[in-house]
Amino acid sequence: MGPPGAGKGTQAVALAERINGAHVSTGDIFRANVAQETELGQAAKRYMDAGEYVPDEVTNAMVADRLAQDDAREAFLLDGYPRTLDQVAKLDQILADLDSGLDGVIALTVVEDELIGRLLERAKVSGRSDDTEEVIRHRQEVYRNETEPLLAVYRDRGLLIEVDGMGSPEEVGARIAEALSTRA
Ligand code: ADP
């Protein structure tokens, strides 16, 4: 978990590889569907472009489907999901049905000015339609309102692992590895 620009995607790809698990990024799946102009992509696009969350029922159904696939059976790393309390409840159900569960929830912390700066930098090269300054600021606000409350939920469950997300991707990756090793 972490606000837009915290470096979730970068770290998630590396960590999924390390745990030999499926990397399940809801943002990536939505973008692939938008590019392929699928029905799901059409349903998601206007929300994404506006920096809003895609409706829970759309996202939840997509994740349920993805986690039921073979390559996610042994291990998976969720990137960008859950982001709402409704998604937390639905994820609990999905995992219970699969006889599975979460080992931990990694949250990357980065100060807001740095987040905006990083996203504006990324905007120059990403070509993402949601990387304009106005939408970037809105995404931060949506994160604070909708997603930040989830940190307390996972903290109460003893699953939260907070990691300082400032610094280079390598530094942050090393901190994550360190946090996981002292926990295991
Ligand atoms: P970032 O967190 O950097 O903004 P993502 O690639 O994770 O980027 O997500 C991009 C967009 O995809 C979000 O702004 C949102 O519209 C949609 N999205 C991704 N994950 C979810 C989710 N779990 N619930 C609802 N919408 C989502």
Image (tube, helix red, strand yellow):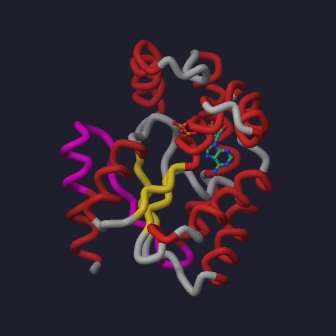
Is 51 rendered above or below residue 28?
Answer: above
**Residue 152: image x %, image y %?**
58, 65
* Residue at the image position 19 percent from the left and 54 percent from the top: 174
Q: Quadrant of the C terminus?
A: bottom left
Quarter assignment of residue 177: bottom left
Q: Residue at x 60, y 34 (%)?
A: 140
Q: Is residue 120 above or below residue 160?
A: above
Seen in the picture, residue 33 relative to 116 is either above or below; the reply is below
Relative depth, front residue between 22 and 10: 22
The quarter of the displayed image where residue 41 is located? top right
Left or right of 162 on screen, residue 143: right
Q: Position of residue 130 (x, y in %)?
A: 60, 24
Residue at the image point whose x is 58% and y is 35% from the top: 31
Looking at the image, can residue 52 be seen? no
Image side of residue 83 versus residue 172, left or right: right
Name the one closer to the observer, 163 or 176.
Answer: 176
Q: Which residues are magenta?
A: 156-175
Residue 48 falls within the magenta-colored stretch: no
Q: Position of residue 33 (x, y in %)?
A: 63, 38
